[in-house]
């Protein structure tokens, strides 16, 4: 897979989740940028898009970027007119028509053809105007930038679009309050990192049952805990051991014979996998949160570990732990410092999680920057851009193998 990606040059590839009203992930907007310049597309929009979408995604497979979800792809005008879109799998993509595309007769003809073939069409960064009426008649989804807009402004935009058979997607949703407002106004899809930015109330205490889970989480993630003790921690928690064994014996894992104990499971699949499964199960316990948070944690963990190895750290497993636990604020809706009071973690991991300091903190910051598409922030790693990108794709692939646990 890495070879297939690399041969298409230094192009960063990223993604941003798109959630439904129940906060389940339905797709990802696929982001890409030439590593050499600070612009999302190349000098020739059409050739850049053709290279990235057709060569990279079709050769590697969209599943390596978006898993089993839909890929929302930005489509410039020339790419549309040249009918490159028809090479993309219509059941896997949503074609986002950029706001710069004008409703000329040729463009409308191309959209009519795509709609008749069954492609899903979205209007990106849409601002209502009567000249776009034909676009609205052909579109399935309309994306509205909600950042900085008042309730009255959003209500007016929704009212104008109510007569068209489109589903509304709110993009740049940064807070839970904005998510709730957009949902009340009739938006169906939501894009942005609101789900990862919890409403932390000062002085809020972590419930006792959650503290017990945190204590168990700390014991499982403590690299100093010997094998037998780790197995004992899992075995003594009936709910956790049941869930681990149920997953180990599932068809998804595909072991040749049934596993009856945690000891046996650890011998069959390896203690590292058991540790990760147990950690995910604990993190997913209790209060309901979007599963995308756990997917994000897995991608961060594996990418931090990969990068740790690349820069020559003697303890890449600590980088993995740092990435995995970096979402605890969102899961527990409490300050990281408060959460970590209940976790017996090494000082360097605590410093990385609370202040972004030390080598692990720098690596975690770079992984977060990649996640947001702030790819110029990655220069501090002093690694080839293509290497960083390949590690990100590999991390997504790895994280997808855990989807049955987090769903």
Image (spheres, grey):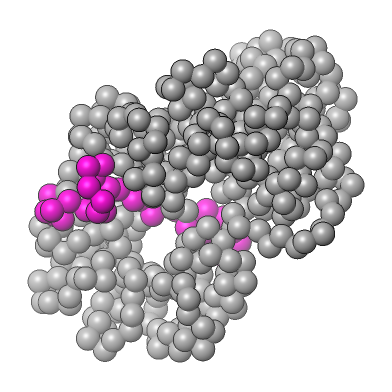
* Residue numbers of the magenta segment: 18-47
* Quarter containing the N terminus: top left
The residue lying at 57 percent from left, 28 percent from top is: 319
Q: Is residue 25 magenta?
A: yes
The residue lying at 51 percent from left, 74 percent from top is: 187
Give above or below for 120 relative to 281.
below
Name the spot of residue 178 as percent of width and height, x first. Answer: 57, 72
Residue 392 seen from this side: yes
- Report the side of 92 relative to 171 (left or right): left
Name the spot of residue 233 as percent of width and height, x first. Answer: 83, 23
- Report the side of 9 relative to 92 (left or right): left
Name the spot of residue 368 as percent of width and height, x first. Answer: 49, 44
Name the spot of residue 71 as percent of width and height, x first. Answer: 37, 51
Instruction: Indicate the quadrant where residue 310 lies.
Output: top left
Give above or below for 368 relative to 261.
below
Instruction: Indicate the quadrant where residue 212 lies.
Output: top right
Q: Nearer the viewer, residue 112 or 388?
A: 388
Give above or below for 353 relative to 237.
below
The residue lying at 39 percent from left, 70 percent from top is: 143
- Report the side of 143 relative to 282 (left or right): left
The residue lying at 46 percent from left, 18 percent from top is: 312
Q: Is residue 135 magenta?
A: no
Q: Nearer the viewer, residue 22 or 31?
A: 31
Q: Nearer the viewer, residue 394 or 249?
A: 394
């Amino acid at each position: 897979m890495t070879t297939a990606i690399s041969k298409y040059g230094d192009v960063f590839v990223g993604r941003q989740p798109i959630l439904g009203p129940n906060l389940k992930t339905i797709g990802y907007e696929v982001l890409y940028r030439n590593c050499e310049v600070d612009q999302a597309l190349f000098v020739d929009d059409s050739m850049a898009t053709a290279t990235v979408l057709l060569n990279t995604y079709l050769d590697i497979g969209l599943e390596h970027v978006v898993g089993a979800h839909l890929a929302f792809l930005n489509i410039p005008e020339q790419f549309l007119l040249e009918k490159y879109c028809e090479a993309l799998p219509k059941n896997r993509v949503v074609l986002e028509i950029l706001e710069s595309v004008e409703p000329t007769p040729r463009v409308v003809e191309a959209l009519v053809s795509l709609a008749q073939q069954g492609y899903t069409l979205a209007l990106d960064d849409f601002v209502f105007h009567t000249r776009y009426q034909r676009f609205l008649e052909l579109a399935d989804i309309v994306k509205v930038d909600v950042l900085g807009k008042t309730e009255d402004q959003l209500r007016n935009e929704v009212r104008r679009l109510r007569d068209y058979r489109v589903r509304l997607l709110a993009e740049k949703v940064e807070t839970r309050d904005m998510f709730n407002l957009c949902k009340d106004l009739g938006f169906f899809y939501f894009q942005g990192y609101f789900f990862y930015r919890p409403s932390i109330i000062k002085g809020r205490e972590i419930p006792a049952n959650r503290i017990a889970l945190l204590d168990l989480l700390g014991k499982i993630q403590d690299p100093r805990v010997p094998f037998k003790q780790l197995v004992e921690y899992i075995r003594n928690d009936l709910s956790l051991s049941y869930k681990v064994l149920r997953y180990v014996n599932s068809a998804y894992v595909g072991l040749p014979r049934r596993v009856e104990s945690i000891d046996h499971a650890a011998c069959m699949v390896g203690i590292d996998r058991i540790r990760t499964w147990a950690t995910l199960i604990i993190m997913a316990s209790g209060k309901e949160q979007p599963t995308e948070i756990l997917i994000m944690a897995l991608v961060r963990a594996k990418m931090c570990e990969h990068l740790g190895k690349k820069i020559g750290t003697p303890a890449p497993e600590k980088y993995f732990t740092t990435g995995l636990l970096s979402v605890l604020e969102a899961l527990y809706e409490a300050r990281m410092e408060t959460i970590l009071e209940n976790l017996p973690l090494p000082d360097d991991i605590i410093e990385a999680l609370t202040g972004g300091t030390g080598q692990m903190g720098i690596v975690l910051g770079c992984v977060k920057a990649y996640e947001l598409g702030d790819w110029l922030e990655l220069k501090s790693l002093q690694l080839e851009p293509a290497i960083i990108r390949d590690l990100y794709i590999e991390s997504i692939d790895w994280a997808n193998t855990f989807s049955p646990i987090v769903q």
